[in-house]
Amino acid sequence: MLLDSSSKLSHLAYEMLRIRKIEEAIALKYSEEKMRCPVHLSIGQEAIAVGVCSQLSKTDLMVSNHRAHAHYLAKGGSLRQMMAEIYGKKTGCSKGRGGSMHLVDLECGFLGSTPIVGGSIPVGVGAAFGSQLQGKSLITVIFLGEGATEEGVFAESLNFAALKKLNILFVCENNLYSVYSPLEVRQPAGRDRVLLAKAHGLQASAGEGNRLDEVVKLTSAAIDSLKKGNGPYFLEFSTYRYREHCGPHKDPFRPNEEVFHWEQRDPLLYFPCTDPEKTLEIEREIEEAFAFAESSPFPSFDPSEETIYA
C-alpha cells in the first residue's frame, strides 16, 4: 500500500499518533509502580513500525527486540492484551508471564520479542527457514537495532539467510544509541551496515526512518523484490528515540543541540493526524485498555493449569 491517496496517508498518520499516545501514557503511569517490568519506549521511531507494517499481510511473520511496543501494535496486536501483559496479568498476550519485552500474538503473526541484543535475528531466520521447508510464501520481518549488528550472530544469520535465499526482510532501526553509548564509540568511523549486508549476499538499502513516505516506498520495493524470489533484503532506517534506553524518562546525557535537531524531524510533524475526533478515539481506547489491565486477574503460576506440553 503506497501513499497514493489521502485516506491511506490519514490512516497511517493516525496509527503513528496512536502508538505515540500509548507510549506516552505508559511513561506517565509508570511511576504508579503497577507495571512491574522494564519498559523500552520507541517514542520518536513510530514511522518505521507503521510504514513497514503497512506493506505486510496479517499472515506474514514478525520477530522483534526489547523495544517492541510499536512493532506489535503496528502489526495488529491487541492494545488491551499488551497493557495487561505489561501489568503482569493473566489476560496479557503472554499470559502475564513475559512483560513488556516478551510480547507474543500468533493471531496477527507476531511470533515474539526477544530482549537479548541480537536475539531476534536467529529466531526470525529460523522461522523463515521453517516457512520455506513447509512450502509457504510468507515474509518474515526481523526488527533489530544498529547495536545488534555488532553481534556475531548478525553475520552468521545473514550468511545463512542469503545461502538459503530466505524470504526475510531485516529492518535495522538506527537510533544512534545502544543504552547510553553513541554510535561513534561502538563502531569504527565509516562503517556502512548496508554494505555489510550486501557483502553477505543480501540486497540492501537505507533511508530516513522519520519520513513515513520514505519508509513505505523502500519497504514496498523490498517486499516486491522478496516476492520475486530475489532472496533476503536488508533495510536500515535512521531515526531517534527521545526517551532513555529503559524507562519513562528523557535521556539526561544527550547533547541539547542533538535533541533539538531530531525534534525538528519528528515523524508526527512530517505527517500529523489533525482530526480531533481521532485523537479522542485514541484517548478513549487507551483509558479502556488501562482499566482492562488493572481489573484483570494475576496468573496463578500453577504449571498444571496451562503450561504443560506433551
Image: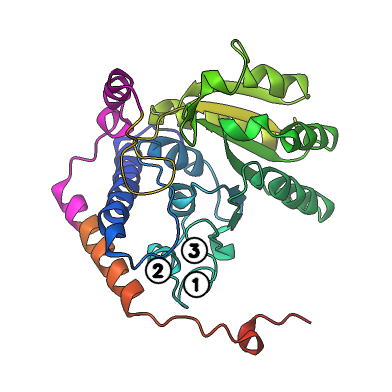
Q: Which residues are magenta?
A: 254-280
| Label annotation for residue 87 | 2
Secondary structure of the residue carrying tag 2 is: loop
Where residue 99 is drawn, which disc sits there?
3
Could you tell me the amino acid type at mark 3?
A: Gly
Badge 2: residue crowd in 10 Å (few <14, some 14–19, many ≥20): many
Residue type of the residue flagged with mark 1: Gly
Residue under the image location 75 percent in, 38 percent down = 153
Residue on which the image places disc 1: 96
Q: Quadrant of the C terminus?
A: bottom right
The answer to whether residue 61 shows anywhere in this view is: yes
Q: Position of residue 23 (x, y in %)?
A: 33, 50
Element type at mark 3:
loop
Does the segment drawn in magenta span residue 265? Answer: yes
| Residue extending furthest toward the top | 190
The reply to whether the C-beta atoms of the residues labelled 2 and 1 are less than 8 Å apart is: yes
Relative to 259, say whether 114 is above or below. below
Between disc 2 and disc 3, whose residue precedes? Answer: 2
Name the side, left or right, on which 179 lies relative to 142: left
Residue 112: x %, y % from top left: 59, 57
Q: Is residue 126 left or right of residue 93?
A: right
